[in-house]
Amino acid sequence: MPPRSYRTAIVGTGGIATAHAAAVRASGGRARLVATADVDLDRAKAFAETWDAPRAYASLDELLAEEQVDLVCLCTPPEQHAPLAARCLEAGVTALVEKPPTLSLAEFAELREAESRSTAHVATVFQHRFGPAAVRLRRLVAAGELGRPLLATCATQWYRDEEYFAAPWRGTWEKEGGGPTMGHGIHQFDLLLSVLGPWAEVTALAARQARATDTEDVSMALVRFESGALASVVNSVISPRQTSELRFDFERATVEVAHLYGYTDDDWTLTPAPGHEEIAWTPGPVTAPSGHGDQLAAVLDALDQGEPPPVTLQDAGRTMEFIAALYASAFTGERIHAGQISPASPFWRRMDGSGTPWNKAGAR
């Protein structure tokens, strides 16, 4: 039988929607873009024309009422992710949601509950998990070929000027949920977590150094994992020389990647420890940088097999809890342990808890 072709819609036709549309087009017919939606109908129509989608709508509700779709890619501003994903679940349609999937742990718990009542699923876009090099690294780790993980560093040092934050939802707790911890570095430290497994405790700092935002513009964390590995995590939007870097020091080798917004196999290196020169990093053919196409292919594979598509809400929960713990540590001065943030904590309902030092009365 020929492979199934999944009827796909894109909701929210801003910048990131182009990456989703390109991934659909590159899927070899496994996905077909049948509709778009945006609160700006003219923009939805223009996007649909550019990407050969037959129809455009002014809302997700209109789209779901008129179209029989299998998959919806949610590319709206963050505050709309959870309510629109819940609407997809009610309609029995799987949603692939841009990061962050929700603005808080409370909203995340509500979304998991909605998924439990639905035949459909929610997957979060963490595309860097799916590049061939990251898949290879996780296989080496799982097979024990690199030995125990000992130390890791994770740095997302990007630059966003004041004009970038002119969009009314950016740099706000109410609409974006956080600063570079929530919206920029999340890609790199999600990949870190996917390699090193469950984290145990976080000690962190966050500050507003240069941008006139409600949120932080830089954060730093020290992390201990259940395995005993230690890691540092830096997230910034004030760094003129931009880079995205990960380094893993295992007993038998160091594995590193340096890139910006997407890596290829050529961006990765493996340095064996003395006496372990037999460990080899065998790159595959040079491909396009890691991106949405890799994850979409994995999502379609899961749908073919009748399984929840990656990254599941269970998987994304570890990353979301890490973000909340980082903020809780930064704003309380306490070390935060996994599982510590409960519904009784102010950081359960808002990532800034009871407020940041710079937004409180009397702060500069």
Image: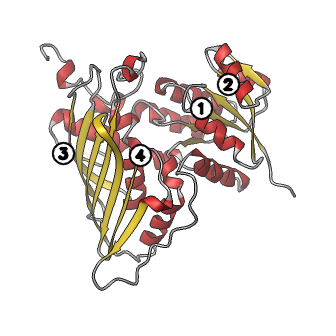
Tell which circle, 4 or 3, labels the residue nearer the N-terminal end: 4
Mark 2 vs 4, N-terminal side: 2
Comparing 321 with 297, the one in front is: 297
Identified at 80% across, 50% down, the residue is: 4
Instruction: Tell me: 208 left or right of 199.
Output: left
Upstream in sequence: badge 3 or badge 1: 1
Q: Quadrant of the N terminus?
A: bottom right
Q: Work out whether mark 1 precedes mark 4 in sequence or the reverse, and give the earlier one.
A: 1
For discs 3 and 1, the disc positioned in front in the rendered view? 1
Which circle's residue, 1 or 2, is located before the other in the chain? 1
> What is the three-letter code of the residue carrying label 4?
Leu
* Position of residue 77 measured from the top left corner of the image (x, y, whole percent): 50, 25
Contact between marks 1 and 2 (CB within 8 A): the answer is: yes
Callout 3 environment at 10 Å: few (<14), some (14 to 19), or many (20+)?
A: some
Q: Which of 185 and 72 is in front in this view?
A: 185
Q: Residue at x 47, y 24 (%)?
A: 79
Q: Calculate the distance from the C-alpha at mark 2 to the C-alpha at mark 4.
A: 26 Å
Q: Which residue is pictured at 62% across the width and 42% down the height?
A: 121
Q: In this view, does 353 lie above or below 133?
A: above
Q: Which amino acid type corresponds to the residue marked 2 in the rendered image?
A: Phe
Residue 335 badge: 3
- Counting every numbered tag in the picture gives 4
Is 78 rendered above or below residue 315? Answer: above
Disc 4 target residue: 260
Q: Residues within 10 Å of mark 4 (few under 14, many from 20)?
A: some
Task: Please tell me whether mark 1 sits on a helix, a strand or a loop.
Answer: helix
Q: Can residue 95 be seen in this view?
A: no
Q: Mark 1 points at which residue?
A: 17
Circle nearer the viewer, 1 or 4: 4
Which of the labelled discs sits on residue 47, or is there none?
2
Residue 112 in percent (x, y) is at 52, 39
